[in-house]
Amino acid sequence: MGKNVKYRGGISGLRQLCFLALAAALFAVADSGCFLAVPVFGAFFSLRTAGLVLWTAFCLRLALAPFEARRAICGAACGLLMGIMTLLGLGYSLNLPLLVTPWRYAAALLAVSAIYAASAGAFLRLTARDRASGRAGFRGRPGSRRPWEAGSGAKRPGRSGASGSGLRLWLFLTFLTGCVYVPVFLAVYPGVYSYDASVQVLQCFGSLPLSTHHSLLHTWFLCGCLKAGLVLFDSAQAGLALHSVVQSAFMGGVFSAVLCRMRRRGAPWPFLLLSWVFLAVNPYLAVFSFVTTKDVLFGAFFLLTFDMAYDMTACPEGFFADRRRTALMWVCVLFMCLFRNQGIYVALFFFCLTGLYWGFQGRGRKKGEAASPAVKGREVKRLAVFTLTAAAAWYVLSGPVPALLGAEKGDMREMLSVPMQQLARVYHEAPDKLRGEERAYLEKLIDVNALNSYVRVNADPVKSGFRTEVLKEDPGRFLRVWASVGLRAPRVYLDSFFMGNWGYWYPGASQYWILYILFDGAFMEPDANILGIRRDSRLPGLEELLRRGTLTPAFESVPVLRFLLNQAFPFWLALLSLTAAVYRRRQQEALPLLLVIGYWGTLLLGPVTNLRYALPLIYCVPSMAERAIGLQAEPGDAFPSDRG
C-alpha cells in the first residue's frame, strides 16, 4: 500500500532535549494567575521575564533558520490567536480590565503573540515531516528504518500475525487499566452518585415524568443497573456497583483500543505509555469512569468516532471498502448522538464539511488527471449514505420511539442560555439600555426572582426562571427584543458571552467553582435520593486522597499539570494540530479536527463552563497530540486491515 522507504530524522536529539527542558522552564516561571502576563503587567525586570525572553529567542532561532515563509505564516497565525485568547482570558479570569490605553494593549498583544508564534514555529520545525518518508522529524535517526522494512526481519503492522499481537496488547492494556480502576472502585464504592442521576432515577422510580431532557439511553442504562441490583440483591447499592463495574470496564476497553490503534499507526512506546498514564492513571479521568453522568459514555463514543474519522479522511476508499470498520464507526456515531443531544449537530457539521471538501477537491481536478481516493464521487456518495442513515436512525430513536414510550420532549430553554444571560446582564448592569416595554416583556419571560439571582459566570439561576410558554406564544417577539437590545448594548452582549465560556479557551486559570468533580454526590437529600444510595468506601484512605485530588485540586499548584489538565488545553492542542496539518499540507489530518471544533463550539453556547462538559475533548488529547507531533504513518501504512 505505502512505499517502504528509509526514514531520515530532522532536528538532532540534543536540540530536542533543549526544547523540552526550556518548555519545562517556561511552565515553571509562569504563575497560574499570571500565565504569560509579564508584558501586560509591566514587570519587565524579573526572572520570569528573562526566562520568557530566552525561550522566545531560542524558539525563533529554530523557527526561522532556515527561513520558510509557510512555517512563519502558520506560526504567526497560531500565535496571534493564542495571544488574543491569553489577553482576553487574563481579563475575564481576574474580572477587571487589564490595560489602560489601546497602545499598551497592542504592545502586550504583540509581545504575547510573539512568544506563542515563536513556540509554534519551533514546534513545526521540530515535527516537520521528512519529504522522503512522510514521517515527522521527532523520531528516528538518519538512515534508520521502519521495523517492517526490507532486511529488518520484522513483520509489518496489520499483516499476518498482527491481529493476534494487537489482541494481546489490548488485553494487556485493559488489564493494566483494571489494576488502576479496582482500588479506585473500592475507594468510591459503590460509585459516584452525582450530577443528574437523582433526577433520572426519579423519572423511572419516582413521580417525575420521563423526559428526553436527559439522554433516555443513559437513563435506561443507569436505572436498568439499579433495577438489576434491586431484583437480584434487593439493594440499590449493588445496582450502582454494577453500573460502576460495567461503565469502567467499557471505558478501560475503549482507552486500550484507541492506544492499540495508535501503536498500529506507528506511535512509539514512550508516547504510548504517557498516553496510557494520561487516560487511565489521571485521577480526574479515573474517578470519572465511576461517575453517573452521561458525559462519560458520550465521551467514549466521541473518542472512538474521532479516532476512526482519521481512517476515513486519510484513505476513504479503503475505509468504505472495509464494511466491518464502516459499520463500527456508524454505530459509534449513532451512540454518540443518542448519549448527548448536540452529538447529532457535531456529526452533521463534520460529515457535511468533509463531503463538501471531497466534492470540491474532485471538481478541482484537471481533465484526465487521476483521482485520488479522497475525491472520487463514489466515496462522496458513500459518505452521504453513511450520514443520512445515521441521522435517520437517530431521528427515529430520539423522536418517534420516545413519544411512543410516553417520554416528554426536553425544554427548549436549554438552547437559549446565551441570549437569556445576555438579556439578564443588560437588565442588571445596563438598565438604561432597556425600553419600558422591553423591560416588562423580560420580566414576563423570566421570573423576577430568577433575574435577581443573576450571576455572570452561570446561566442556570436565570434559566431556572425562564418561562418557555411565554416564548412559544410569540417566538418572533423574543428574537426582536433580543436583537434590539443587543444593537444598543453590543459590548455588554459580547462581554456576557465571553464571561460565560472563557474557561474553554483560556488555559491560564480555572473558571468558577466547576473545575472539580462533584465527588461526594449531588441531590443527596432524602426527597431526591429516593433509593437511599450512599458512599460505603472500602479504602477510606484512598477515598480521601481522591477527594482532595478532584474536589480541591492540588495539581493547580503544579506548573505543568495545571496546564495539561485544564479544560481549555484540548482546544489549544486542536489549534496546534490544525496549524501543523495546514503547514504540512495534510488536509486529511485537519478534517477530523472538525469534530473537536464543532463540539467545542457547542460548549460555548452552554450555561456554564464545566469540567464534565469538556470531558470528550480531554479524552481526545493523546490522539490529537499524536497528529500534532506527526507520529502516525502514511495513510497506506497507517491503516491496514484490522483483520490481519
Image (spheres, rainbow, N blue to C red):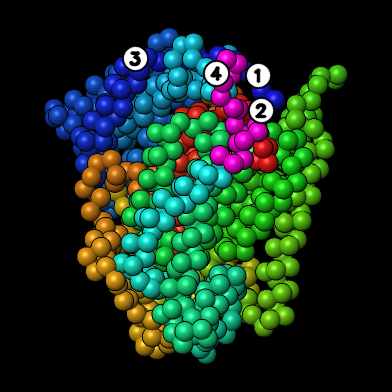
Q: Between tags 4 and 2, which lies in front?
A: 4
Res. 3 mark = 1
At mark 2, the secondary structure is helix
- Gap in angstroms between the C-alphas marked 2 and 1: 8 Å
* CB within 8 Å, label 4 to label 2: no
Q: Residue at image x 38%, y 79%? A: 523
Mark 4 vs mark 2: which is more N-terminal? 4
Image quadrant of residue 535?
Answer: bottom left
Q: Quadrant of the C terminus?
A: top right
Mark 2 vs mark 1: which is more N-terminal? 1
Question: Within 10 angstroms of label 4, few (less than 14), some, or many (20 or more) residues?
Answer: few
The residue at which mark 4 appears reads as 152
The residue at which mark 2 appears reads as 636
Label 4 sits on what residue type? Answer: Ser
Residue 163 magenta:
yes
At mark 4, the secondary structure is loop
Label 2 sits on what residue type? Answer: Gly
Main SS type for the magenta part?
Answer: loop
